[in-house]
Structures are given as C-alpha cells and as structure tokens.
Image (cartoon, grey):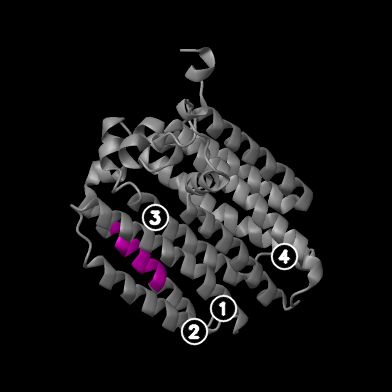
Amino acid sequence: MTQSSQNSPSQRKSLPSPLQWLYAFWKFSRPHTIIGTSLSALGLYLVAVAISSTGFAVTQIMPVVGAWIACLCGNVYIVGLNQLEDIEIDKINKPHLPLASGEFTQKQGQIIVMLMGILALVLAWFNGPYLFGMVVLSLAIGTAYSLPPIRLKQFPFWAALCIFSVRGTIVNLGLFLHFNWVLQKTPSIPLPVWVLTLFILVFTFAIAIFKDIPDMEGDRLYNITTFTIQLGSQAVFNLALWVITICYLGMVIVGVLRVESINPAFLVITHLVALCWMWVRSLAVDLQDKSAIAQFYQFIWKLFFLEYLMFPVACLLA
C-alpha cells in the first residue's frame, strides 16, 4: 500500500463544518449565561434611560453595543476558563460540553479563552472608564474562581461569593454607571438601581447554590466541596426556593412603599405572578431525577432573565 493511500482523505479525521464549529462555540459559551449577560446590559440601559429621562438617541448606539460585546467576550472568557480546568469533571457532570466531548481540543479552548479575555479588555478600554473597571474586576474574580492555585470554586462560601458578587453587584453597578456616564456624564447611582442590584445579588446566591445539585456525582469524585454535598440536595433545593421567595417579596414591598421612579402596580403584580409560577413548578421536581433538576435550574435562569425585563418596564412606566 502506498503512502498516499494511507493518508487518503477518507481516513483522515474530517474537519467540522462552520455551522458545527459555531454550534460547539455556542455550547462552549454556556448559552444561559450569554442570555443573562445580554439581558442585563439591555435592562440596565433601559433603566438608565428611564431614570435620566434623556430618551433614545443614535449617538448612544456604539457605547451600548460596545459594552454589550465587551461583556459577552468577558462572559466567554470566564465560563471557558472554568471548562478548561474542569474537563475531567465535565466528562461526568456535563459530557455535552465541547471540551468534555472532544469537539474542541484543549489548545483550541485555550486560544478562544485568551482571545475573548483580550477582546473584552480592549473593547472596555475604548468604551469608558466604568466599563473597563467592571470588566477588569469581573475577569479577575472569574480567574480566581477557576484557576489554580487559588481556585475558589473548591470552597462553597467563596464559590458562591464569586458568582453573586460578579452577577449581582459588579455587573449591575458597573453597567449602570457606564450607561449613566454615556447619557449624563454623571457617576450617581439612584435608589431603583440599588433595589435591582440587591434583588439580583440575593437571587444569584440562589443560582450559585442550586447549580451544584445536578453536579453532585462529579464534584464528590473530584473533591469539590459544595453546599449540596455538605447539606444534601433537598436542603439546598428548599433553601434556593426560599431565597428567591424573599427576593420577590422584597420587590412587592418596594412596590407597596411606592419607591420613586418605579411603577408600583406593575412591580407588585408581575413579581407575585412570578413567585406563584416558581412554587407551582417546584412541586413537580423529582430530586432523584437529574434531568428534572437540570430543567428546573434552567427555569430559575429564565426567572432571572425575566427580572431584567420586568424591572426596566416598571421604571419606564413610572
């Protein structure tokens, strides 16, 4: 047999098509976090517009789009770095992810993560000081969360703190300051933004503790200590539900108190509906069924997404 026949195209590993690569990249980016990041950027821009009463203008498009893309790149850097450090764990917990399944090589993952991190910093630098500060802090915490020797995800308290400090505080305040700077050139943070930030901060804690319930098997095998392993899945499930309940009841109280720049009726009704919806869905969850737990986790993310639509609308209606 000749050398050329041994290396015939049919015997070589076929390269993925552009669509296959894009789909693998979409999975690598963790779509639920991409949607959450996009909606947080849109929601905080709308809140800034509502509070500033400046209205929409064509000149705002580039700073808004620039902030959104910088946040997306930072998002991919953080979740991608986590996957690079968790390949063996993900083969058990999340075998569909591109690095765990072999769709991406480790080298490809490293290149994507480095490029996304650099792009996030460069775009943020050119779009303003508040956005740059937010991106730098987010990437630093995301790195400490995943990368040895710090690897804060090994410790339940610090892991949760990383997640809800970035999602709950740094992203909300940083993005609002950026958009307010674009609209008014002022660095102030009004009460409605603090209300939204507190809601997201506490809600993200529920996400942070809930996300480990379906991953118990792989975490235990690789000595990753989580609240689920320490307390049990039922206790963490109940805790997450009550934390989210406190979030929604807090928003209802804000509506009853008629906080300025927020439409009270819309705020109260929408949050009571979301709260009832969550409890009804929770009754059907079988904690022995990993698929059911994962589906409810995605539902919690949908509630998280919904807040970045409900709250800005309440501000716009005020």
In the rendered image, residue 39, in percent from the top left (x then y), is placed at 56, 64
Which residue, given by chain and number where applicable, does mark 1 sit on? 313
Q: Is residue 178 left or right of residue 93?
A: right
Residue at left offset 43%, top offset 59%? 202
Which secondary structure lies at badge 4?
helix
Residues at marks 3 and 1, CA–CA distance in whole angstroms: 24 Å
Q: Are marks 1 and 4 in contact (CB under 8 Å)?
A: no
Point out the residue furthest to the right here. 59
Residues at marks 1 and 4, CA–CA distance in whole angstroms: 17 Å
The amino acid type of the residue labelled 2 equals: Phe
In the rendered image, which quarter contains the C terminus? bottom right
Q: Are marks 2 and 4 in contact (CB under 8 Å)?
A: no
> Which of the two discs, 3 and 2, labels the residue nearer the N terminus?
3
Label number found at residue 172: none
Q: How many discs mark residues in the rendered view? A: 4
Residues at marks 4 and 3, CA–CA distance in whole angstroms: 28 Å
Label number found at residue 207: 3
